[in-house]
Image (cartoon, rainbow, N blue to C red):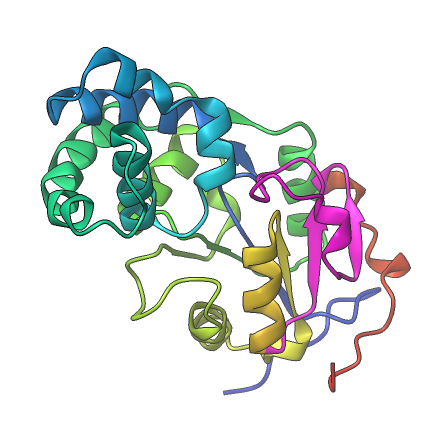
Amino acid sequence: MTPPKLIPDTQFQAAIIDLDGTMVDTLGDFVIVLQHTLDAMGCHPIEIARVNRRFIELTVGKGTEDLLRRSLAHAWGLPDDDAEVAQHVPQAWQHYQQHYTRLNGQHAEVFPGVLEGLQKLKAAGLPLACLTNKPTAFAQTLLERKGLRGYFSQVFGGDAFERKKPDPLPLLKTCEALGTSPDKTLMVGDSSNDAQAARSAGCPVVLVTYGYNHGEPIEQVPALAHIARLDELDWAALPPVNPAR
């Protein structure tokens, strides 16, 4: 197979873009779905109210199982690694799946500048993949409901590979699917989770400043650039990538 060519005016062959916190503000979805899930698990209204937008903002990003485990623990006032909490995660997942399937995207909004940014990338001829820790089916549906699915040749969720971000495997597998080398594939994300995965995979990374970084300033995370909107991504202004980094 002939290797993909570099896009004119860039040093890249393709881009991989995160979903939650990078393209779509999904905190509202998570809050409503998790509160329904906790209610189905028999939680008291006071326990349910503990799982709010601020808690989700600090928690989301490492996959649904992690989110459920930490939400149950927070609601019940138990440590995240409590054995009783782990025992209830499979049951919670069944309720969560039902509610998320029904509510996916209803309380979520595309961030300003995302649609324009994707249009610019498409016009430049840059192949795009969406890589998220959200389950693949939920990611596909959300992108379709928000009018973004058509910009991506590949969509991979947290259940697509053996491991999730921040492990580098999902990025390496996505590069393989795109037919590109990691050092020529830009990762665009919103958290240290994305940056760690990209760094370990050998992918350069750009970080948006408006997403969910577990309550920590994203500007403190090393990246080629930090941008306030996706349509502010200036290929020509990005510094050269050092493959050894």
Magenta span of residues = 202-230
Q: Residue at x 62, y 61 (%)?
A: 195
User: Could you say which quadrant of the image residue 224 lies in?
Assistant: bottom right
Q: Is residue 231 left or right of residue 149?
A: right
The location of residue 49, given as percent across then percent down, is 33, 16
Compared across the picture, whether 50 is left or right of 185 comes to left
Q: Is residue 15 above or below residue 92?
A: below
Q: Position of residue 188 (x, y in %)?
A: 63, 54
- Judging depth in this view, the residue of 131 and 218 nearest the camera is 218
- Camera sees residue 99: yes
| Side of 35 where 190 appears, left or right | right
The residue at the point 23 percent across, 49 percent down is 82
Above or below, 35 relative to 182: above
- Quadrant of the rendered structure where residue 88 is? top left
Q: Quadrant of residue 67?
A: top left
For residue 85, above or below residue 46: below
Query: Does residue 28 sit above or below 192 in this rendering?
Result: above
Q: Is residue 156 magenta?
A: no
The location of residue 34, given as percent across then percent down, is 28, 27
